[in-house]
């Protein structure tokens, strides 16, 4: 029984790390990345639609993104959504393709982005710890009901702590990499 709890906890912790990684991909670091536009939603015929479902997004150069809509009539809506986003990008369109030049980051903007990724990493750590807390509570209930012995509970708690430490370490490593990427001039 405790093995299933631990397997579920490990899976949920891995998903939390993956979520942090995806959030980091949406933070601008001075170089073009197609993941940068993942958070952008476009009002498409009254429905909020993710941009990546409406267009082909590419990074042909280190400081340029191109957005090629599947439906050319959505061009204006896509441009508007990009301009209203917090990315600070200015789209230019030729009627077929929207080009997004990625400007170099100022020192102040870099510091703001570092604060943002630190907050995102902390949110991920909290998510991992919440999984640990939930699993510990479930273990205590199993012991209380007599389905698991005290020794098994102690072993499971040690294993759970090891999983928690590993996943928090993974988040810290991702944070170091992203911070270095942002601060790189």
Image (tube, rainbow, N blue to C red):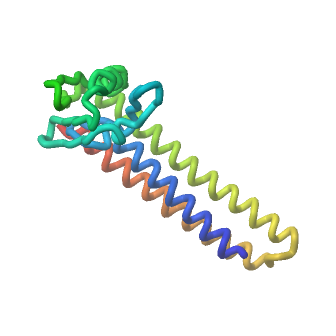
Quarter of the figure with residue 183: top left
**Which residue does the image show at 82% across and 76% down from the upper left?**
147
Q: Is residue 80 left or right of residue 3?
A: left
Residue 108 seen in render: no
Work out whether residue 89 or residue 2 is closer to the camera in this orientation and state it. 89
Residue 9's spot in the image, x, y percent? 61, 63
**Which residue does the image show at 17% across and 31% down from the upper left?**
97
Quarter of the figure with residue 18: bottom left
Quarter of the figure with residue 24: top left
Q: Is residue 4 above or below residue 11?
A: below
Q: Is residue 32 above or below residue 176?
A: above
Q: Is residue 31 above or below residue 110?
A: below
Work out whether residue 45 or residue 65 is closer to the camera in this orientation and state it. 45
Residue 105 seen in render: yes
Residue 152's spot in the image, x, y percent? 73, 78
Q: Is residue 34 left or right of residue 23?
A: left
Residue 170's spot in the image, x, y percent? 43, 58
**Which residue does the image show at 21% across and 43% down from the upper left?**
58
């Amino acid at each position: 029984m405790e093995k299933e709890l631990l397997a579920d906890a490990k899976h949920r912790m891995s998903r939390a790390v993956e979520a942090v990684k995806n959030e980091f991909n949406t933070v601008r670091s001075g170089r073009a990345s197609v993941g940068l536009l993942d958070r952008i939603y476009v009002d498409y015929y009254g429905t909020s639609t993710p941009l990546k479902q409406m267009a082909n997004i590419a990074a042909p150069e280190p400081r340029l993104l191109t957005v090629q809509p599947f439906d050319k009539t959505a061009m204006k809506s896509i441009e508007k959504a990009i301009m209203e986003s917090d990315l600070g990008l200015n789209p230019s369109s030729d009627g077929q393709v929207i080009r997004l030049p990625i400007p170099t980051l100022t020192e102040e903007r870099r510091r703001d982005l570092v604060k943002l990724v630190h907050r995102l990493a902390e949110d991920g750590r909290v998510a991992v710890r919440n999984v640990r807390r939930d699993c510990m509570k479930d273990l205590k209930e199993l012991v209380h009901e007599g389905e698991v012995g005290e020794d098994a509970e102690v072993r499971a708690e040690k294993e759970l702590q090891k999983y928690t430490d590993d996943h928090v370490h993974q988040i810290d490593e991702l944070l170091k990499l992203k911070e270095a990427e942002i601060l790189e001039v």
